Amino acid sequence: MRRRVVISSTIGNALEWFDFTVFGLFAGIISKLFFPADNPSSSLLLTFATFGIAFAARPLGGLVFGLYADKHGRKKALVVMITLMAVGTGLLGLLPTFGAIGIAAPLLLLLARLIQGFSAGGEFGSASAMLIEFAPPGRRGLFGSFQMVSQNLAFAIGATMAIGLNLGLSADAFASWGWRVPFILGILIGPTGWYLRQRCDESPDFQAYLAEKAAAAQPAKRTTLGQLFSDHPVELIASFCLIAAGTAINYVNAIFLPTYAVAELKLPLLNAQMGLLFISLANAGIAVATGALSDRIGRRAVLIPSLVIYAALFYLMLQRLVAAPTTTNLWQLQIVAVFLGVLAGPMPAFMTEIFPVGVRSTGASLMYNLAVMLFGGLAPFINTWLVAATGDKTAPVYYILFAAAVGLVGLSMYRGRPAVPEIAPQPAQ
């Protein structure tokens, strides 16, 4: 059953994040098809704004699905979320363009993204809780790391498909129908994800929590949210700050950087996509290794150095890339993101184990999505605006340095209170 949970959480989560990734990778063509074409820069900004605004639905989805998962179980919430994601993705792949229906096109595009954002909102908290609650004692970091493996697989699959379509289709064919292929294939998320997750048991920790709650036979004095905010403010702040740093790095590397390399540095999009593909595959393995390492030496001992080293190397490599915009220098900058893999490994375990079972999914989901909305979803827009407003092509450095500082502040606030005791899992089938 543990193996089944890891597979269903990893594959299902990868399928969900694949659709988010493809939207970012295809931002250039989407901006031309769904917004007025008289000003390419404005169209790209509007596309990234649509990408970012949709993240406003994620905290709401995180709250709704987090509360649902903490009351009715992780499994039920995960099944509903992946089905809803298929609806938003299918709509995206079938939308008519601005040339066909005018202003209705970007409005429908925004609706599809809002549906995607709402459904993805509860994914991190519920899937991470499911993974660590099935983990054997002392291996939560390892099991939780598969949450980040799934996201790296999503980036790798999205980049592979983007590369294949760019190589296999003419520019006209790609603009006409090729860009729709990943979104239409994404409709398969629904039945595939539903089948995988339906075959999993509910987590043993959650079952034990329900049994303990039933045995107590006392009405709850406070709501889940009341308990969360009154009893766990430090955990909430630390979680928010850590995700703010990680998601800023993630979206700058995976979404903003390929478009930036083409628009500002005039480098081939294919080269940027290939760099993203290789680093995503590498980070899938690195996340597992560092998640397991954090089980041995502690979460903070892995998280803090990764943030500091990434920020310093990003500063140096971006300066070099702007001074000499070559594919080699671009790839060197992208390679720095291996430290995102180091950061990502322990993150799901850290984010979830510091909360008790009864508020775990809600706490992790709410903070994760607030941070992603503010620091991740708007990262492409903010960095594009920074470059345009300052005329400085190295301006994204300031965003990364600020995000890393936020993460370090959060980690410094959480001084390693004893983690919530692990409930020994029931024997795996």
Image (spheres, grey):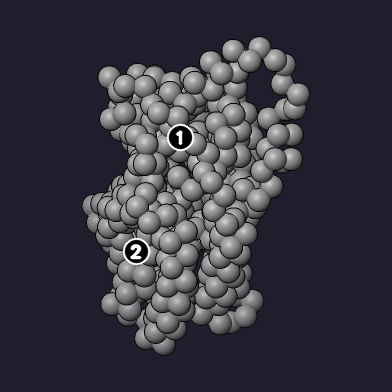
Q: Residue 163: give x, y in percent of width and height.
A: 28, 55
Amino acid under disc 2: Val
For residue 179, above or below residue 163: above
Q: For this view, does 285 lie left or right of residue 154?
A: left
Q: Residue 12: give x, y in percent of width and height.
A: 38, 33
Q: Residue 28: give x, y in percent of width and height.
A: 46, 59
Pick whichever, 343 or 96, lies toward us: 343
Quadrant for the C terminus in the image: top left
Q: Are marks 1 and 2 in contact (CB under 8 Å)?
A: no
Q: For this view, does 215 lie left or right of residue 327?
A: right
Pick whichever, 119 or 427, lies toward us: 427
Pick whichever, 108 or 317, lies toward us: 317
> Which quadrant of the view contains residue 38?
bottom right
Dot 2: within a 10 Å radius of its alpha carbon, few (fewer than 14), some, or many (20 or more) residues?
Answer: some
Q: Circle 1 sits on which residue?
A: 422
Quadrant for the N terminus in the image: top left
Q: Which mark is residue 338?
A: 2
Q: Is residue 79 visible?
A: no
For residue 5, above or below residue 249: above
